[in-house]
Image (cartoon, rainbow, N blue to C red):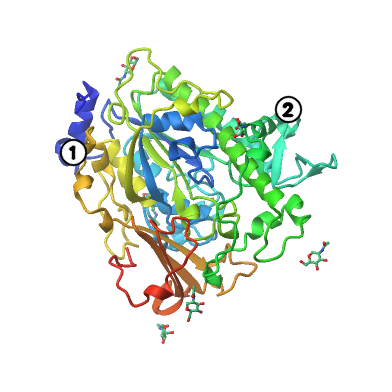
Amino acid sequence: MPPLPPGRGVLWLGLVLGSVWVARENAALANPPADALNILLIIVDDLRPSLGCYGDKLVRSPNIDQLASRSLLFQNAFAQQAVCAPSRVSFLTGRRPDTTRLYDFNSYWRVHTGNFSTIPQYFKENGYVTMSVGKVFHPGISSNHSDDSPYSWSFPPYHPSSEKYENTKTCRGPDGELHANLLCPVDVVDVPEGTLPDKQSTEQAIQLLERMKMSSSPFFLAVGYHKPHIPFRYPKEFQKLYPLENITLAADPQVPDGLPPVAYNPWMDIRQREDVQALNISVPYGPIPVDFQRKIRQSYFASVSYLDTQVGHLLSTLDDLQLTNSTIIAFTSDHGWALGEHGEWAKYSNFDVTTRVPLMFYVPGRTTLFPEAGEKLFPYLDPFDSVSELMEPGRQSMHLVELVSLFPTLAGLAGLQVPPRCPIPSFQVMLCREGRSLLKHFLFHDLEEDPYLHSNPRELIAYSQYPRPADSPQWNSDKPTLKDIKIMGYSIRTIDYRYTVWVGFNPNEFLANFSDIHAGELYFVDSDPLQDHNVYNDSRGRELSPSLMP
Ligand SMILES: *[C@@H]1O[C@H](CO)[C@@H](O)[C@H](O)[C@H]1NC(C)=O
Ligand SMILES: *[C@@H]1O[C@H](CO)[C@@H](O)[C@H](O)[C@H]1NC(C)=O
Ligand SMILES: *[C@@H]1O[C@H](CO)[C@@H](O)[C@H](O)[C@H]1NC(C)=O
Ligand SMILES: *[C@@H]1O[C@H](CO)[C@@H](O)[C@H](O)[C@H]1NC(C)=O
Ligand SMILES: *[C@@H]1O[C@H](CO)[C@@H](O)[C@H](O)[C@H]1NC(C)=O
Ligand SMILES: *[C@@H]1O[C@H](CO)[C@@H](O)[C@H](O)[C@H]1NC(C)=O
Ligand SMILES: *[C@@H]1O[C@H](CO)[C@@H](O)[C@H](O)[C@H]1NC(C)=O
């Protein structure tokens, strides 16, 4: 076992192991300890784990890979619902969609369901200065048009001014005119305001870090990046990293034969873009012409590399400000995105490609040794230099984990009391959590001592769900509003398989009827890792061990 880092590492261990925790359990929580760790939470929009650190051989993501090399990375992390607002409200409140009752974009949990505390609110109430930059909460009704201010944030959240151009005609087409396209590589000096939202968010976050450097309070800074969410509006030079001839199609670009129609989502949103409309693609199944499939994949990957540079600038600022030894960094995404797998081009499903997310935590002195004076842990890396292959992987866990675990895990890593487990139901309980705390994974430098190694990984489950308005794909199958939901697909992922049942759902009572099964899916990880061969019918009546309800 490598030696424990000195000083703060031991103190941190003490905090986590509980003696200090227990003592503080009933204390007034408003004054954080003088050495409280800061939190930098990076949330990326629609980022599947197409990253070097997740084994992707094509994508250039050296800065995120470098973060991974100093972090504990979870290989099997899953979102609870593969669409933006429900996923974010779920992990930011630490409750599943069946508790937030947000399956669409149209309600605010505090008035619709229960006055649930959020992660940033909890840190704020514990003496942290909490700040939101970019897309953290989904904007609009689901966060009361205020990103849940004032409850979650110490200051009004920041939104980049250039965000308003995302869906306007700013993409130069082959005809020389400006269009509202899906594929939108731009010359940044030519776009309105001469900048892009994620660049502005990085600049704002850097300014806030500079200000917090002077502050005596610990901070919780959440930075929400927009790319690689559609439209793929990114600095055009990033295309050069991905010559079209090097872009492959998805390994399984066909709609699978045994896929129940209710499981398929017709990706209506990308069809609205001018360049896609011009292709006159058949609804609901497509396909998209293969040369355009390559272009979509190229632009997604280029957007990821652009995002990576923003993460790189942000993290190198932590080094420059000497905050790396006192700041926990968590990096994740709200859900994945299908890039042609199963003939799909979006989120909105229960497949691994849309529910699986990157998830990693850098904890100073725990996931890596403390930096020596003057040592930089996160120097900016240029994706145009071929450095990423040289990156050492950091620690990795193969255990199944869920985004609802973010709340207890961040609280625990910071040395705050971990909120108690939620009772069932928990609508009246303001502060509790439905996810497992992942703290145990961080306690041991030596993997041999990881207590989870000796637990049965087959007992771990990640739950996801997705609503549908009908048994067959139709105009609103991707994003049904609450009143239109007739069917809910409940899905469990274990280390061995993914099992989904689509059952009747009553949106007035929020009741699923597990006697009313519309369809089922079962895929085994070993024999069918891409989930193309549904063996549900072959195994009906067979007992699958874990329960379908969390
Ligand atoms: C909800 O919780 C917030 C934060 O604790 C509190 O300020 C507010 O009064 C609560 N609202 C209701 C209706 O209980
Ligand atoms: C939601 O926002 C409105 C308008 O700002 C405000 O009046 C209302 O109190 C907010 N709701 C809650 C629960 O804070
Ligand atoms: C494209 O593929 C070729 C052949 O594998 C390789 O030599 C080249 O480096 C690749 N280009 C880029 C930019 O990755
Ligand atoms: C499974 O059985 C159902 C009901 O009999 C049928 O509609 C469906 O096509 C079958 N699916 C597969 C993959 O064989
Ligand atoms: C679009 O496709 C449909 C059938 O897929 C065809 O009937 C129609 O003529 C096409 N329209 C254009 C403008 O190509
Ligand atoms: C972090 O490192 C800086 C520079 O080496 C040092 O001044 C500071 O005291 C360290 N902070 C902690 C909490 O160890
Ligand atoms: C649940 O579904 C079954 C089978 O379709 C039906 O007989 C039953 O009435 C349903 N229960 C409720 C409460 O709707």
Q: Secondary structure at mark 2?
A: helix
Which residue does the image show at 19% across and 43% down from the upper left? Answer: 25
How many numbered circles are shown?
2
Observer-side mark, 2 or 1, equals: 1
Query: Which quarter holds ligand 7?
Result: bottom left
Q: Is residue 327 left or right of residue 521?
A: left
User: Where residue 56 sits: x, y (%)?
Assistant: 49, 40
The furthest residue to the top: 374
For label 1, the SS is helix
Is the CB–ligand 6 distance for label 1 below 8 Å? Answer: no
Q: Position of residue 162 (x, y in %)?
A: 66, 37
Label 2 Cα neighbours within 10 Å, binned few <14 / some 14-19 / many ≥20: few
Work out whether 66 lies above or below 138: above
Which quadrant holds residue 341? bottom right
Instruction: Please say if 460 is above or below 233.
Output: below
Is residue 164 left or right of 371 when viewed as pictured? Answer: right
- What is the C-alpha distance between the residues marked 2 and 1? 53 Å
Q: Earlier in the sequence, mark 2 or mark 1?
A: 2
Q: Is residue 47 left or right of residue 232?
A: left
Q: Amino acid at mark 2?
A: Val
Q: Amino acid at mark 1?
A: Glu
Q: Which mark is residue 189?
A: 2
Q: Quadrant of the N terminus?
A: top left
The numbered mark at residue 449 is 1
Residue drawn 73% across and 45% down?
Answer: 168
Foreground residue, 104 or 132?
104
In the foreground, 386 or 25: 386
Res 120 quadrant in image = top left
The x, y position of residue 316, in whole percent, is 47, 22
Q: Is residue 512 visible?
A: no
Q: Is mark 2 within 8 Å of ligand 3?
A: no
